[in-house]
Image (cartoon, grey):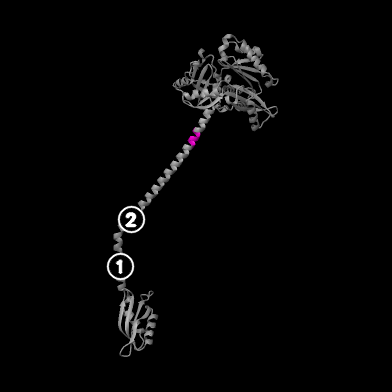
Amino acid sequence: MAGKSKGRQEQAWTGHPRDKALLLEVSADWIKLIEVTADRRGEVTLSRVHLEPVDQETVVSDSLAAALKNGFSRLPVLSCIPRQLINVRLLELPSTEPAEIADMVELQVGRQTPYSLNEILSGYKALGAIRQGTYTRVMLVIAQRRIVRERYYAIEGAGLAVERMTVSSEGVLNWLLYRTRTQAPEKLVALLDVDSFFTHMIVVQHRKVVFTKSILWGAGQAGEGLESFVQGVREAVQSCGEALRGERIEAVMVSGAGIRIEGLDEAIGQALSVPCTKVDSLEDVKLGKGCGTLRDERYATASLTALVGMALAPDRLDFDFVPDVVRLREQLVRRSRIWSAMAALLVTAMVCGSLYGMLAVGYRLAGRDRLKAQADALQGPSVDVERMLEVIRATRERQDARFLPERLLPVIHRSLPEHVYIENLTIDTGRRQIAMSGTAPSRKDIRELIRLLEESPLFAGVEEGGRTVMNPDGRFAFQATGRFEEGMRND
């Protein structure tokens, strides 16, 4: 049974605190600024608190700036607007489709407030399906633009950023759900959170808001008696009869400044014939060093229930009111950041391209200079090598047995026809040519000599040169030239 109870408790509460958060509520009577921290087990500790009464001469931004000097962290602020300064309506809409619900809410906004649409900001959240899943209960919140702007400017004037601007109802509801997390969900429970000049009434069932109302009576009026407050609570309970659908409230809790009002719980219990108990919201958090003064009499009219609920579950805050001027400014800042980022990327790309080009040119110039230096360094040795090669070639040509007369003369002798005489023979080994002159008895013998030399393995391109004439002896004087055969082997 203990295990099942623990599992049901964990399922009923899904909120998670942050490691550190800064929360603010500015009401007509108090500036409430707290800083909270959370450990690994999820236990929240109020590390710093600043409560300051508000009068006609109070400048909220200056007060916040002075408070921040007392060690507060400059975190983005989670702020809330008091329930008394906004309109909250619970609507039952005949649809479960989100798009249809949004259209219906838009039509209802103008009907639920006496202000024009240009003067208000609105938001809503679905609370769940009702009437066998055919209707949806919606919480509609309407705030004046002026009120939202004043709080934004006050926070920014103190040098802080606004993370979220919600309503105190969300914080009070968070704390109530946390407080009743172990109770049966079908139980109808009402909460009266008493602040300095108004009381926030919330009725929940099945972890959902059934009814909510702001009663114009606070701890500041407790000295005048409890009758008007009791009467206001009685009227509020009567007005929520339709929302309760014939069921009765089973328990009433009094929190906030109401826990310090003597006899308040007894008066409410007798008027409603329902058990009424006082519950201190500070019991669900730890008080850090220096925060024990919260229980002093000078803070008796201030309620911290909304801020405690926001600290317990900042992830369960759905509403966020942002003035049009601030939203436009954020859009401009966001766009300017995008353009700045694009410009920075473009400049970076250009710089990288220029750097790459400079490096590439530099590497090529350095490579060219390196090759030139190597060529200059090799110029002298290459000339010496070329000269040595020429000497080697000349030596090999001189020593080449293929061009020796003792090898060429036998071939030429075998090629001579009968009665053909060679008078002059020149062997040019450098140009690889031979030239000869002589006499022959006929032109036919000259042609035969040329043919035989051409067919020999040593000569090629042998041809008759100059003019062939008959000498006084009746013989034909001739000249012939040829070149050595390229494929001639050195046998």
x, y percentage for residue 395?
29, 71
Picture layout, residue 218 above or below residue 401: above
Q: Amino acid at mark 2?
A: Lys
| Residue 44 visible (yes or no) | no
User: Is residue 55 one of those drawn in magenta?
Assistant: no
> Residue most toward the top?
224
Contact (Cβ within 8 Å) of mark 1 with mark 2: no
Q: Main secondary structure of the magenta part?
A: helix
In primary-sequence order, the first of circles 1 and 2 is 2
Q: Quadrant of residue 456?
A: bottom left
Front position in the image: 208 or 275 = 208
Residues drawn in magenta: 333-338
Q: Label 2: few (<14), some or many (≥20) within 10 Å?
A: few
Q: Amino acid at mark 1?
A: Glu
Using the image, tell me which numbered label, if any, was put on residue 390: 1
x, y percentage for residue 331?
52, 32
Q: Quadrant of residue 468?
A: bottom left
- Would you say 108 lies left or right of 62 here? right
SS category of the residue bearing label 2: helix
Q: Label 1: few (<14), some or many (≥20) within 10 Å?
A: few
Marks 1/2: CA distance?
Answer: 26 Å
Which residue does the numbered mark 2 point to in the structure image? 372
| Residue 109 visible (yes or no) | yes
x, y percentage for residue 64?
47, 21
> Residue most toward the bottom?
473
- Would you say 245 lies left or right of 346 here? right
Front position in the image: 94 or 342 = 342
SS category of the residue bearing label 1: helix
Using the image, tell me which numbered label, if any, was put on residue 74: none
Q: Residue at x 64, y 30 (%)?
A: 103
